[in-house]
Image (cartoon, rainbow, N blue to C red):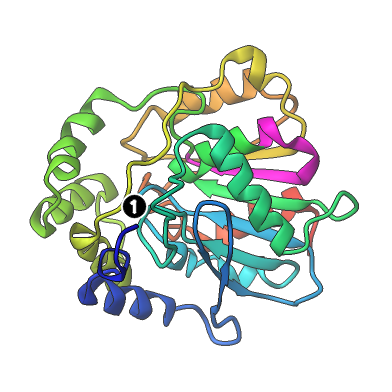
Amino acid sequence: MTDAATTVPPPAFLAAYDALLATWPAGFTAEPSTIPTPFGPTRLNSCGPADAPPLLLLPGGGATSGSWYANVADLARTHRVHAIDPVGESGMSVPDPDRPLRTLDDQRIWLDALLDAVGARPDRPAVLAGHSYGAWTALQYALRAPDRLSHLILLDPTQCFAGLSKGYLARALPMLLRPRADRITTFLTWETQGVPLDPAWLQLQLANAEFKGKPPVTAPSPVPAELRTLRPRTLVVMAGRSRSHDSAKVAARAAALLPAPRIAVLPQATHHSMPFAQPAELALHVREFLGTP
């Protein structure tokens, strides 16, 4: 067993995490809870009517539940929103040292536990949304547990329909191998291309340099035969200025392989600014997709 010191995030990270959660809009304050799962306790930050249908949000790799600050108000008007800190990644979830989350089946079991905890049932399936790596996780889960979801929302998904661009990987590799605040700043400045960055969001990205997470689950992208079997209704929203991949090609491939998906583009968004670059436009696409006012 690891001792408590190895599971507590560093003080700078904790301060930045709390500061970003404090930016959630008035009336939609994050309500934290910790859900026991077979892979360790998982932090959810929730808001919205307690009796509304559940909507779960998976952040991009290295991000946290707080990164949905620009979206929660719109989503929580009609759903009980649960923003997740994935086990083993940045945030307040604590991985079980004796049972690390390593495989797609592990991810399915972990998400099953969260859906059970938030009241998703066969007669009340959940909406699952994810950004970037979170979209990959959401898609893999939807292929393995389709009856648990009514809708699937993929925001600038990576490794779902195409790989990452070589230029993006070349820029990201130094930051990933030896994360430092200056490398993170340089990379995000390059990728976001002048999109205004919330200071609290940026500070948490910089504090991630001190966070020692576990390696994420990796697996091959779903093959076309798998994608054609996807059952939950699916919305794919691409970042028009993403530098992680060619958004038009990814959108075309998703349209060709998924059963009747809805495809949308946020023209000013980049990959890393996707959750907050055009929140009003994103909310409109999601409302139309979910059929909510």
Residue sitting farthest toward the top: 225
Q: Which residue does the numbered mark 1 point to in the structure image?
A: 62
* Image location of residue 96, percent across then percent down: 44, 55
Residue sitting farthest toward the right: 123
The answer to whether residue 132 shows anywhere in this view is no
* Image location of residue 39, percent across then percent down: 51, 52
Residue at the image position 63 percent from the left and 37 percent from the top = 141
Residue sitting farthest toward the bottom: 26
Query: Which class describes the residues within 10 Å of circle 1: few (<14), some (14-19), or many (20+)?
Result: many
User: Is 81 placed left or right of 268 in the picture?
Assistant: right
- Residue 65 lies within the magenta run: no
Element at label 1:
loop
User: Is 157 placed left or right of 200 in the picture?
Assistant: right
Nearer to the camera, 123 or 155:
123
**If the image is split into quadrants, where does the N terminus sit?**
bottom left
Q: Quadrant of residue 153?
A: top right
* Image location of residue 272, percent across then percent down: 35, 49
Residue at the image position 75 percent from the left and 53 percent from the top = 126
Nearer to the camera, 22 or 12:
12
Hey, what amino acid is under mark 1? Gly
User: Is 50 placed left or right of 156 in the picture?
Assistant: right
User: Is 153 placed left or right of 18 in the picture?
Assistant: right
**If the image is split into quadrants, where does the C terminus sit?**
bottom right
* Image location of residue 85, percent across then percent down: 47, 60
The answer to whether residue 143 shows anywhere in this view is yes
Count of numbered tags: 1
Residue at the image position 55 percent from the left and 65 percent from the top = 71
- Residue 154 lies within the magenta run: yes
Magenta extent: 142-156
